[in-house]
Image (cartoon, helix red, strand yellow):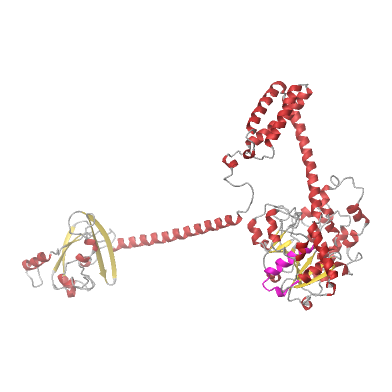
């Protein structure tokens, strides 16, 4: 050895310190690469006694080593695979070579018989490291260096794996977000408030065919009646009496039951007894052609009865919808009496200066129902953020004018402005100007409504019963087509029916841009329903040549009208034109929606559906979530919320705005 020390002395020192100065390295070199700087490729690791006490845990340079000049023997494999031996002097090493203390490194610890060593290399600011595990019992760890090209490939593969992992995580997050959105959508569409026999804990749901016994007994009754008729025709009196008796007993066993859980315990025994009688009747009387003919006759008879009951039901529903319940009839009578006795006819509503202020929010309500109108006003004012900027223009008929005015003089909503007018005071609204009024006074219309010699109200004209409703005779129903004449100084107005309930602040409707349209309304067509062909007679060329049968219908009941654009386009003139053409009622039947669809054809701007939800007066299967989120809910149909016909689960949306503690309502016994 060189460097001023003899080999024995240097070996003795190395043996004393337990240091192996020979680092055996196996280098795997690519066939396409050359071995550069072969004597400087590998970083040796030594035990340095002077490094143990250093705070930096063993990192020193070769210049600080106590033996500054000694030979390092290196073995390696050349590109041909032959083992070569070389040496390098320590003083020729660059300053970037690092001396490590292996006793302070974790990779020299024994873990389950495996040894792990870490080779670190640092040169000119570049570094690489690779971990290797060895099996064995020896305490000497051997390091296997990796060529830079291979390390570069490993680094690229690691980067690709990281990018792929990031892409998969991102993709998983996207899929998860889509699943969450779909779940939220399904949750919103799910109606959790549908009431009925849906409890899984009911006994009948223990059996998937929960009404099988009920159906069996009913089928037995039908067959018993068929066989009884045949037995009577063949003079089988005994069998006939038995079948009739068993039919009666089976009918009593069923009672009002609709499923097996509601049957009496003796019902099954009765079904067995009926089965024995039917088996006897089949043996004696069965004739395929005869039985088929008898069942066909029974089916036709049942269909006739069902149609008759439908007509009666329709008539009674229409009759109930026309009638006024006693409390609702009582309220205007009491109010009118107090109005005249207490001299309220001399009192006026405050804030008259607001009635024609176009900068405020104006509502038009045309009704003869005091209680319904109070709910509309109360619900609107209650949800208004600035009640003082809201003005309610109420028009009623002469019969209810005193009652309507008295109610709002005593029960005016806080902050809001109220105006009550009598439609009979509009002198310009006469038969010479208004075609509808002229038609209502005609002999043909009087005959249609008051024809005394009609054969039967149940059979003749049953399909048109709803059009015989007295509301179609009132000009209050047609006054909506004369809004610019009723309010000549206003630019916009929100029309509200008296069978609606407001659930949100309606102020934003005045800022909706109608894009040059006159009417802002919610469209009602879904797929093929509620389109123009539902309301208009497209077999008439006057209709077919001017309108699209598939055009989407919209709702009257909550409409924002641009009165300035109305006047420019002479909308009232268009309405008069079509009303005169429909004097014989061949273009459409009575009502205000068909002429409205015609008048505002291609002049209606569709509002968001959440503003107006319809059907609470006829459809018991509406989405509960849509109802609760709606700005306005509409009880269009016969089942008005103030009638006993009302759909029970929808009544609360209306009744919570009724002032049940009011003196007049208590006097008339109007209870919840």
For the view shown, which residue lies furthest in the right direction? Answer: 443
Between residue 135 and residue 149, name the one nearer to us. 135
Q: Which residues are magenta?
A: 369-391
Coordinates of residue 529 in the picture (x, y in percent): 72, 53
Q: Residue at x 36, y 61 (%)?
A: 158
Q: Quarter holding the C terminus?
A: bottom right
Q: Quarter holding the N terminus?
A: bottom left
The answer to whether one can see residue 481 in this image is: no
Q: Is residue 517 above or below residue 171?
A: below
Residue 144 in magenta stretch = no
Residue 372 in magenta stretch = yes
Coordinates of residue 130 in the picture (x, y in percent): 28, 62
Between residue 543 and residue 152, name the one nearer to us. 543
Left or right: residue 474 versus residue 373 is right
Q: Quadrant of residue 337?
A: bottom right
Q: Is residue 588 above or below residue 88?
A: above
Coordinates of residue 312 in the picture (x, y in percent): 80, 45
Coordinates of residue 404 in the picture (x, y in percent): 81, 67
């Amino acid at each position: 050895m060189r460097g001023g020390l003899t080999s024995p002395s240097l070996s003795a020192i190395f043996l004393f310190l337990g240091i192996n100065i020979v680092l055996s390295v196996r280098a795997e070199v690519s066939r396409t690469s050359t071995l550069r700087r072969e004597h400087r490729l590998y970083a040796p690791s030594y035990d340095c006694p002077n490094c143990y006490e250093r705070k930096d845990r063993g990192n020193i340079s070769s210049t600080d080593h106590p033996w500054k000049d000694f030979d390092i023997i290196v073995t390696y494999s050349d590109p041909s695979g032959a083992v070569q031996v070389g040496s390098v002097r320590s003083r020729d090493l660059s300053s970037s070579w690092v001396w490590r203390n292996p006793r302070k490194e974790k990779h020299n610890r024994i873990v389950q018989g495996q040894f792990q060593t870490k080779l670190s290399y640092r040169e000119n600011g570049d570094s690489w490291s690779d971990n290797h595990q060895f099996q064995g019992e020896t305490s000497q760890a051997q390091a296997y260096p990796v060529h830079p090209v291979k390390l570069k490939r490993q680094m690229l593969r690691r980067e690709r794996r990281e990018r792929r992992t990031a892409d998969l995580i991102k993709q998983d997050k996207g899929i998860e977000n889509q699943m969450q959105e779909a779940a939220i959508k399904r949750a919103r569409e799910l109606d959790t408030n549908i009431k009925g026999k849906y409890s899984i804990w009911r006994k009948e749901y223990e059996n998937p065919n929960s009404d099988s016994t009920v159906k069996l007994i009913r089928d037995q009754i039908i067959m018993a009646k068929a066989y009884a008729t045949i037995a009577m025709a063949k003079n089988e009196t005994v069998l006939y009496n038995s079948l009739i008796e068993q039919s009666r007993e089976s009918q009593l066993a069923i009672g009002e039951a609709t499923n097996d859980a509601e049957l009496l315990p003796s019902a099954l025994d009765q079904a067995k007894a009926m089965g024995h009688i039917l088996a006897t009747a089949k043996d004696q009387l069965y004739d395929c052609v005869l039985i088929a003919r008898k069942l066909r006759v029974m089916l036709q008879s049942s269909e006739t009865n069902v149609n008759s009951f439908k007509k009666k039901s329709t008539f009674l529903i229409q009759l109930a919808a026309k009638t006024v319940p006693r409390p609702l009839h009582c309220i205007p009578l009491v109010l009118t009496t107090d109005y005249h006795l207490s001299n309220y006819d001399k009192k006026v509503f405050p804030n008259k200066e607001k009635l024609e202020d176009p900068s405020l929010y104006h509502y038009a309500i045309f009704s003869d129902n005091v209680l319904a109108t109070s709910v509309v006003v109360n619900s609107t004012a209650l949800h208004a953020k600035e009640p003082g900027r809201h003005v309610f223009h109420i028009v009623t008929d002469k019969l209810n004018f005193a009652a309507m005015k008295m109610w709002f003089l005593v029960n005016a909503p806080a902050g809001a402005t109220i105006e009550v007018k009598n439609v009979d005071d509009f002198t310009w609204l006469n038969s010479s100007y208004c075609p509808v009024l002229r038609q209502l006074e005609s002999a043909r219309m009087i005959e249609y409504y008051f024809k005394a010699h009609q054969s039967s109200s149940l059979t003749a004209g049953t399909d048109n019963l709803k059009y015989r409703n007295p509301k179609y005779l009132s000009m209050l129903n047609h006054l909506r087509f004369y809004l610019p004449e009723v309010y000549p100084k206003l630019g916009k107005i929100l029309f509200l029916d008296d069978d609606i309930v407001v659930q949100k602040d309606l102020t934003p409707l005045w800022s909706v841009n109608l894009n040059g349209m006159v009417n802002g309304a919610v469209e009602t067509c879904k797929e093929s329903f509620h389109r123009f062909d539902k309301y208009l007679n497209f077999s008439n060329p006057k209709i077919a040549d001017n309108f699209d049968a598939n055009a989407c219908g919209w709702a009257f009941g909550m409409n924002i009208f641009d009165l300035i654009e109305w006047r420019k386009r002479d909308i009232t003139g268009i309405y008069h034109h079509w009303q005169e053409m429909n004097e014989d009622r061949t273009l459409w039947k009575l009502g205000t929606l068909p002429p409205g669809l015609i008048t505002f054809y291609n002049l209606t701007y569709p509002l968001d559906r959440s503003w107006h939800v319809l059907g609470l007066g006829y459809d018991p299967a509406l989405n509960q979530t849509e109802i609760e989120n709606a700005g306005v809910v509409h009880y269009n149909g016969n089942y008005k919320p103030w009638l006993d016909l009302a759909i029970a689960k929808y009544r609360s949306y209306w009744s919570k705005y009724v002032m049940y503690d009011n003196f007049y309502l208590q006097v008339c016994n109007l209870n919840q």
